Amino acid sequence: MEPSHILALGVFGFYFIIILALFGLIIPSFQVKGLHTSSSKGKAILFVFLTAASFTHTWFYMFKYMFWSFKNYEASLAFTTGTPLERVSNWLVDTSLFEEAWAAVCFGRVNWWWSEQLCLFTVGGWTVFLATEGRRSRVKHLWAYMLLGQVVAISVASNLFYLALVLSRPSSPSASSTPTLARPKLWISVLISLATIAASPFTSERTFLPNLLVMHAVLVVPLVASASVTSQKKISSRFSLRVSTLYLIVFVASAAMRLRTIKATLGSLPSQDYSPYGLFSVAWDVLHAHPAQSSIGWDVVWTSLSFIAWVSTRPSDSTQASKVVEIPYLLLATPFASVGVTAPYILRPRGELSADAKDE
Protein backbone atom coordinates (compact mmCIF):
# COMPACT_ATOMS: atom_id res chain seq x y z
CA MET A 1 0.00 0.00 0.00
CA GLU A 2 1.34 3.44 -0.94
CA PRO A 3 2.32 5.92 1.80
CA SER A 4 -0.47 8.31 0.76
CA HIS A 5 -3.04 5.56 1.30
CA ILE A 6 -1.60 4.66 4.70
CA LEU A 7 -1.68 8.33 5.66
CA ALA A 8 -5.31 8.67 4.52
CA LEU A 9 -6.34 5.67 6.61
CA GLY A 10 -4.38 7.06 9.56
CA VAL A 11 -6.08 10.46 9.34
CA PHE A 12 -9.50 8.81 9.07
CA GLY A 13 -8.80 6.64 12.11
CA PHE A 14 -7.32 9.58 14.02
CA TYR A 15 -10.58 11.49 13.50
CA PHE A 16 -12.45 8.88 15.54
CA ILE A 17 -9.66 8.78 18.13
CA ILE A 18 -10.07 12.55 18.60
CA ILE A 19 -13.80 12.08 19.15
CA LEU A 20 -13.23 9.40 21.78
CA ALA A 21 -10.51 11.49 23.42
CA LEU A 22 -12.80 14.53 23.66
CA PHE A 23 -15.58 12.48 25.26
CA GLY A 24 -12.94 10.98 27.56
CA LEU A 25 -11.75 14.46 28.54
CA ILE A 26 -15.15 16.08 29.04
CA ILE A 27 -17.20 13.43 30.84
CA PRO A 28 -14.73 12.67 33.69
CA SER A 29 -14.37 16.43 34.30
CA PHE A 30 -18.00 16.82 35.37
CA GLN A 31 -18.28 18.20 38.91
CA VAL A 32 -21.21 16.49 40.61
CA LYS A 33 -22.20 19.35 42.90
CA GLY A 34 -25.65 20.12 41.58
CA LEU A 35 -27.41 16.81 42.22
CA HIS A 36 -28.81 17.83 45.59
CA THR A 37 -32.51 17.75 44.64
CA SER A 38 -34.84 15.56 42.61
CA SER A 39 -35.29 18.53 40.27
CA SER A 40 -31.58 18.72 39.43
CA LYS A 41 -31.46 14.96 38.95
CA GLY A 42 -34.36 15.23 36.54
CA LYS A 43 -32.54 17.94 34.59
CA ALA A 44 -29.41 15.81 34.42
CA ILE A 45 -31.41 12.86 33.08
CA LEU A 46 -33.05 15.15 30.49
CA PHE A 47 -29.72 16.35 29.10
CA VAL A 48 -28.21 12.86 29.15
CA PHE A 49 -31.18 11.75 27.06
CA LEU A 50 -30.86 14.71 24.68
CA THR A 51 -27.13 14.04 24.29
CA ALA A 52 -27.70 10.38 23.44
CA ALA A 53 -30.66 11.06 21.15
CA SER A 54 -28.96 13.85 19.19
CA PHE A 55 -25.75 11.83 18.85
CA THR A 56 -27.60 8.74 17.61
CA HIS A 57 -29.77 10.66 15.16
CA THR A 58 -27.12 12.93 13.63
CA TRP A 59 -24.52 10.18 13.38
CA PHE A 60 -26.94 7.77 11.77
CA TYR A 61 -26.92 10.21 8.87
CA MET A 62 -23.19 10.85 9.19
CA PHE A 63 -22.41 7.16 8.67
CA LYS A 64 -25.03 7.07 5.93
CA TYR A 65 -23.18 9.96 4.25
CA MET A 66 -19.84 8.16 4.48
CA PHE A 67 -21.39 5.04 2.93
CA TRP A 68 -23.05 7.18 0.22
CA SER A 69 -19.76 8.92 -0.56
CA PHE A 70 -17.92 5.59 -0.82
CA LYS A 71 -20.54 4.06 -3.12
CA ASN A 72 -20.69 7.22 -5.20
CA TYR A 73 -16.91 7.22 -5.58
CA GLU A 74 -16.75 3.60 -6.69
CA ALA A 75 -19.64 4.13 -9.11
CA SER A 76 -17.53 6.78 -10.84
CA LEU A 77 -14.74 4.26 -11.55
CA ALA A 78 -14.59 2.01 -14.59
CA PHE A 79 -13.84 -0.94 -12.32
CA THR A 80 -12.78 -1.63 -8.73
CA THR A 81 -10.09 -3.98 -7.51
CA GLY A 82 -8.25 -4.75 -4.30
CA THR A 83 -9.15 -5.69 -0.78
CA PRO A 84 -11.86 -3.76 1.10
CA LEU A 85 -9.14 -1.88 3.01
CA GLU A 86 -7.42 -0.87 -0.24
CA ARG A 87 -10.72 0.26 -1.73
CA VAL A 88 -11.45 2.37 1.35
CA SER A 89 -7.97 3.91 1.20
CA ASN A 90 -8.47 4.75 -2.49
CA TRP A 91 -11.73 6.47 -1.62
CA LEU A 92 -10.13 8.47 1.20
CA VAL A 93 -7.20 9.56 -0.98
CA ASP A 94 -9.41 10.74 -3.84
CA THR A 95 -12.21 12.29 -1.76
CA SER A 96 -12.14 15.29 0.57
CA LEU A 97 -14.91 14.22 2.94
CA PHE A 98 -14.90 17.41 5.01
CA GLU A 99 -15.09 19.72 2.01
CA GLU A 100 -17.51 17.47 0.13
CA ALA A 101 -19.93 17.32 3.07
CA TRP A 102 -19.84 21.05 3.76
CA ALA A 103 -20.19 21.90 0.07
CA ALA A 104 -23.31 19.71 -0.04
CA VAL A 105 -24.90 21.64 2.83
CA CYS A 106 -23.77 25.16 1.91
CA PHE A 107 -24.24 25.44 -1.86
CA GLY A 108 -27.90 25.91 -2.68
CA ARG A 109 -30.31 28.48 -1.26
CA VAL A 110 -32.39 26.05 0.80
CA ASN A 111 -29.31 24.08 1.87
CA TRP A 112 -27.78 27.27 3.25
CA TRP A 113 -31.12 28.16 4.88
CA TRP A 114 -30.57 25.05 7.02
CA SER A 115 -26.82 25.29 7.60
CA GLU A 116 -26.65 29.00 8.38
CA GLN A 117 -28.84 28.41 11.43
CA LEU A 118 -26.24 26.16 13.02
CA CYS A 119 -23.34 28.40 12.02
CA LEU A 120 -24.96 31.50 13.53
CA PHE A 121 -25.76 29.74 16.80
CA THR A 122 -22.28 28.25 17.09
CA VAL A 123 -20.16 31.31 16.33
CA GLY A 124 -22.47 33.75 18.09
CA GLY A 125 -24.65 32.94 21.06
CA TRP A 126 -23.08 29.61 21.95
CA THR A 127 -19.46 30.81 21.85
CA VAL A 128 -20.24 33.72 24.18
CA PHE A 129 -22.37 31.43 26.37
CA LEU A 130 -19.53 28.90 26.64
CA ALA A 131 -17.09 31.60 27.68
CA THR A 132 -19.36 33.31 30.23
CA GLU A 133 -21.30 30.44 31.78
CA GLY A 134 -18.28 28.15 31.63
CA ARG A 135 -16.25 30.59 33.69
CA ARG A 136 -19.11 31.30 36.08
CA SER A 137 -19.68 27.60 36.81
CA ARG A 138 -15.98 26.69 36.60
CA VAL A 139 -16.55 24.15 33.83
CA LYS A 140 -13.25 22.63 32.73
CA HIS A 141 -11.91 22.28 29.18
CA LEU A 142 -14.26 24.75 27.47
CA TRP A 143 -12.31 24.45 24.22
CA ALA A 144 -13.09 20.71 24.17
CA TYR A 145 -16.84 21.39 23.98
CA MET A 146 -16.32 23.64 20.95
CA LEU A 147 -14.03 21.13 19.26
CA LEU A 148 -16.45 18.30 20.01
CA GLY A 149 -19.23 20.32 18.44
CA GLN A 150 -17.16 20.78 15.31
CA VAL A 151 -16.16 17.13 14.88
CA VAL A 152 -19.34 15.44 16.19
CA ALA A 153 -22.39 17.73 16.38
CA ILE A 154 -23.20 21.04 18.04
CA SER A 155 -26.33 19.52 19.57
CA VAL A 156 -24.25 16.82 21.26
CA ALA A 157 -21.65 19.26 22.58
CA SER A 158 -24.23 21.80 23.75
CA ASN A 159 -26.21 19.15 25.63
CA LEU A 160 -23.05 17.94 27.34
CA PHE A 161 -22.33 21.54 28.32
CA TYR A 162 -25.86 22.00 29.69
CA LEU A 163 -25.31 18.79 31.65
CA ALA A 164 -22.01 20.13 32.99
CA LEU A 165 -23.79 23.30 34.14
CA VAL A 166 -26.50 21.30 35.89
CA LEU A 167 -23.92 19.15 37.67
CA SER A 168 -21.79 22.10 38.77
CA ARG A 169 -24.51 24.63 39.34
CA PRO A 170 -24.50 26.28 42.80
CA SER A 171 -27.85 26.08 44.56
CA SER A 172 -28.41 29.85 44.51
CA PRO A 173 -26.87 31.44 41.38
CA SER A 174 -25.83 35.03 41.82
CA ALA A 175 -25.86 37.56 39.02
CA SER A 176 -22.88 39.28 40.59
CA SER A 177 -20.67 36.26 39.91
CA THR A 178 -21.46 36.29 36.19
CA PRO A 179 -18.71 37.73 33.96
CA THR A 180 -19.85 41.09 32.58
CA LEU A 181 -17.00 42.01 30.22
CA ALA A 182 -15.82 40.25 27.07
CA ARG A 183 -12.13 40.65 26.36
CA PRO A 184 -10.88 41.39 22.82
CA LYS A 185 -9.91 37.80 22.06
CA LEU A 186 -13.55 36.77 22.54
CA TRP A 187 -15.39 39.51 20.71
CA ILE A 188 -12.85 39.77 17.89
CA SER A 189 -13.04 36.00 17.33
CA VAL A 190 -16.84 36.14 17.30
CA LEU A 191 -16.92 39.05 14.84
CA ILE A 192 -14.42 37.38 12.50
CA SER A 193 -16.47 34.19 12.53
CA LEU A 194 -19.67 36.12 11.87
CA ALA A 195 -17.93 37.76 8.91
CA THR A 196 -17.08 34.34 7.46
CA ILE A 197 -20.75 33.36 7.70
CA ALA A 198 -21.77 36.56 5.93
CA ALA A 199 -19.24 35.77 3.19
CA SER A 200 -20.15 32.09 2.78
CA PRO A 201 -22.89 32.53 0.14
CA PHE A 202 -20.42 34.46 -2.03
CA THR A 203 -17.50 32.03 -1.87
CA SER A 204 -16.25 30.09 -4.87
CA GLU A 205 -14.76 26.61 -5.11
CA ARG A 206 -11.37 28.20 -4.44
CA THR A 207 -12.36 30.37 -1.46
CA PHE A 208 -15.02 28.15 0.15
CA LEU A 209 -12.70 25.87 2.14
CA PRO A 210 -10.36 28.62 3.49
CA ASN A 211 -13.39 30.62 4.62
CA LEU A 212 -14.84 27.54 6.32
CA LEU A 213 -11.56 26.70 8.06
CA VAL A 214 -11.25 30.24 9.43
CA MET A 215 -14.79 29.99 10.80
CA HIS A 216 -13.93 26.77 12.65
CA ALA A 217 -10.41 27.63 13.82
CA VAL A 218 -11.09 31.10 15.22
CA LEU A 219 -13.80 29.86 17.59
CA VAL A 220 -11.41 27.74 19.65
CA VAL A 221 -9.07 30.67 20.36
CA PRO A 222 -11.12 32.50 23.05
CA LEU A 223 -11.80 29.24 24.90
CA VAL A 224 -8.15 28.24 25.34
CA ALA A 225 -5.79 29.36 28.11
CA SER A 226 -6.58 32.64 29.87
CA ALA A 227 -10.14 33.78 30.51
CA SER A 228 -11.81 35.66 27.67
CA VAL A 229 -14.40 37.21 30.01
CA THR A 230 -14.12 38.92 33.37
CA SER A 231 -16.24 40.48 36.09
CA GLN A 232 -13.44 42.90 37.08
CA LYS A 233 -15.06 45.97 35.58
CA LYS A 234 -12.57 48.61 36.65
CA ILE A 235 -9.34 46.73 35.99
CA SER A 236 -10.17 45.22 32.62
CA SER A 237 -8.74 46.21 29.29
CA ARG A 238 -10.27 49.36 27.86
CA PHE A 239 -10.92 47.38 24.68
CA SER A 240 -13.29 45.00 26.45
CA LEU A 241 -17.00 44.97 25.61
CA ARG A 242 -19.89 44.36 27.92
CA VAL A 243 -21.18 40.82 27.49
CA SER A 244 -24.67 42.26 27.01
CA THR A 245 -23.34 44.50 24.22
CA LEU A 246 -21.63 41.56 22.51
CA TYR A 247 -24.84 39.54 22.65
CA LEU A 248 -26.68 42.52 21.16
CA ILE A 249 -24.16 42.81 18.31
CA VAL A 250 -24.47 39.07 17.64
CA PHE A 251 -28.26 39.30 17.68
CA VAL A 252 -28.43 42.23 15.25
CA ALA A 253 -25.81 40.77 12.88
CA SER A 254 -27.42 37.32 12.96
CA ALA A 255 -30.89 38.75 12.38
CA ALA A 256 -29.65 40.75 9.39
CA MET A 257 -27.93 37.73 7.83
CA ARG A 258 -30.93 35.53 8.52
CA LEU A 259 -33.29 38.02 6.91
CA ARG A 260 -31.06 38.13 3.82
CA THR A 261 -30.99 34.33 3.61
CA ILE A 262 -34.75 33.91 4.06
CA LYS A 263 -35.41 36.54 1.40
CA ALA A 264 -32.98 34.86 -1.03
CA THR A 265 -34.45 31.42 -0.30
CA LEU A 266 -38.02 32.59 -0.85
CA GLY A 267 -36.91 34.25 -4.08
CA SER A 268 -35.54 30.95 -5.36
CA LEU A 269 -38.85 29.12 -4.86
CA PRO A 270 -41.58 28.70 -7.47
CA SER A 271 -44.33 31.30 -7.13
CA GLN A 272 -46.78 28.72 -5.74
CA ASP A 273 -44.38 27.97 -2.87
CA TYR A 274 -43.74 31.63 -1.98
CA SER A 275 -45.04 31.41 1.59
CA PRO A 276 -43.83 30.23 5.00
CA TYR A 277 -45.60 26.91 4.44
CA GLY A 278 -44.02 26.57 0.99
CA LEU A 279 -40.58 27.33 2.42
CA PHE A 280 -40.91 24.76 5.20
CA SER A 281 -42.25 22.18 2.74
CA VAL A 282 -39.28 22.63 0.40
CA ALA A 283 -36.88 22.73 3.37
CA TRP A 284 -38.25 19.38 4.57
CA ASP A 285 -37.60 17.85 1.14
CA VAL A 286 -34.06 19.25 1.04
CA LEU A 287 -33.42 17.97 4.56
CA HIS A 288 -33.74 14.40 3.27
CA ALA A 289 -32.23 14.93 -0.17
CA HIS A 290 -28.63 14.22 0.91
CA PRO A 291 -27.32 12.37 3.99
CA ALA A 292 -24.86 15.16 4.86
CA GLN A 293 -27.73 17.65 4.73
CA SER A 294 -29.82 15.35 6.92
CA SER A 295 -27.03 15.19 9.50
CA ILE A 296 -26.56 18.94 9.81
CA GLY A 297 -30.26 19.68 9.40
CA TRP A 298 -31.25 17.41 12.26
CA ASP A 299 -28.36 18.87 14.24
CA VAL A 300 -30.13 22.22 13.82
CA VAL A 301 -33.39 20.72 15.08
CA TRP A 302 -31.80 19.02 18.09
CA THR A 303 -29.75 22.12 18.92
CA SER A 304 -32.90 24.27 18.84
CA LEU A 305 -34.93 21.87 20.99
CA SER A 306 -32.05 21.46 23.44
CA PHE A 307 -31.60 25.21 23.83
CA ILE A 308 -35.30 25.61 24.56
CA ALA A 309 -35.00 22.79 27.10
CA TRP A 310 -32.06 24.56 28.75
CA VAL A 311 -33.86 27.90 28.97
CA SER A 312 -36.92 26.12 30.38
CA THR A 313 -34.95 24.39 33.13
CA ARG A 314 -32.14 26.81 34.00
CA PRO A 315 -32.14 28.53 37.40
CA SER A 316 -33.63 32.02 37.27
CA ASP A 317 -31.75 35.14 38.30
CA SER A 318 -32.17 38.90 38.10
CA THR A 319 -30.48 39.26 34.69
CA GLN A 320 -33.05 37.12 32.86
CA ALA A 321 -36.46 37.86 31.45
CA SER A 322 -39.43 35.91 32.79
CA LYS A 323 -39.77 32.37 31.45
CA VAL A 324 -43.42 33.19 30.80
CA VAL A 325 -42.04 35.50 28.09
CA GLU A 326 -38.96 33.51 27.05
CA ILE A 327 -40.50 30.13 26.30
CA PRO A 328 -43.37 31.31 24.05
CA TYR A 329 -40.93 33.61 22.26
CA LEU A 330 -38.53 30.73 21.58
CA LEU A 331 -41.28 28.36 20.47
CA LEU A 332 -42.79 30.89 18.08
CA ALA A 333 -39.71 32.71 16.80
CA THR A 334 -37.09 29.95 16.51
CA PRO A 335 -38.71 28.03 13.60
CA PHE A 336 -38.79 31.24 11.56
CA ALA A 337 -35.75 33.22 12.72
CA SER A 338 -33.56 30.25 13.84
CA VAL A 339 -31.87 29.50 17.14
CA GLY A 340 -28.90 31.52 15.89
CA VAL A 341 -31.04 34.65 16.24
CA THR A 342 -33.23 33.80 19.22
CA ALA A 343 -30.41 32.47 21.43
CA PRO A 344 -28.36 35.69 21.74
CA TYR A 345 -31.56 37.65 22.38
CA ILE A 346 -32.54 35.32 25.24
CA LEU A 347 -29.01 34.97 26.65
CA ARG A 348 -28.30 38.71 26.76
CA PRO A 349 -28.24 39.79 30.44
CA ARG A 350 -31.12 42.19 31.11
CA GLY A 351 -30.07 43.45 34.54
CA GLU A 352 -26.41 44.15 33.85
CA LEU A 353 -26.71 47.92 33.62
CA SER A 354 -28.61 48.26 36.87
CA ALA A 355 -26.18 45.91 38.60
CA ASP A 356 -23.28 48.06 37.46
CA ALA A 357 -24.96 51.18 38.76
CA LYS A 358 -25.37 49.63 42.18
CA ASP A 359 -21.70 48.62 42.25
CA GLU A 360 -20.69 52.20 41.65
Image (cartoon, rainbow, N blue to C red):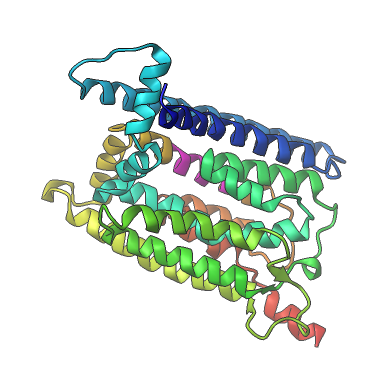
Query: Magenta span covers which residues?
Result: 298-307
x, y percent for residue 358: 80, 84
Query: Looking at this rendering, what residue extends furthest in the front direction?
Result: 2
Q: Evaluate whether residue 316 shows in this view.
A: no
Residue at coordinates 36% horizontally, 18% vertically from top-left?
Answer: 87
> Is most of the magenta stretch helix, strand or loop?
helix
Q: Position of residue 217 (x, y in %)?
A: 52, 56
Question: Does the magenta run of residues contain 144?
Answer: no
In the rendered image, the residue lying farthest to the left is 271
Q: Compared to 258, does 59 lie above or below?
A: above
Q: Quadrant of residue 111?
A: top left
Relative height, residue 280 to residue 244 (above, below): above
- Which quadrant of the figure contains the C terminus? bottom right
Residue 148, percent from left and from top: 59, 43
Taking depth in this image into account, of 94 and 344 the one nearest to the observer is 94
Q: Measuring 42% from the left and 52% from the top, which residue is drawn there?
A: 117
Residue nearest the viewer, comparing 182 with 209: 209
* Image quarter of the N terminus: top left
In which quarter of the view is residue 172 placed?
Answer: bottom right
Is 303 one of the magenta-colored residues?
yes
Measuring from the top left, give residue 266's x and y in whole percent. Answer: 22, 54
Residue drawn at point x = 73 percent, y = 67 percent: 318
Looking at the image, residue 222 sits to the left or right of residue 106; the answer is right
Q: Residue furthest bottom?
A: 360
Left or right: 242 in relation to 41: left
Residue 95 located left or right of residue 165: left
Q: 310 or 206: nearer the eye?
A: 206
Quick check: can you spot residue 155?
A: yes
Residue at position x 42%, y 35% in the image: 295
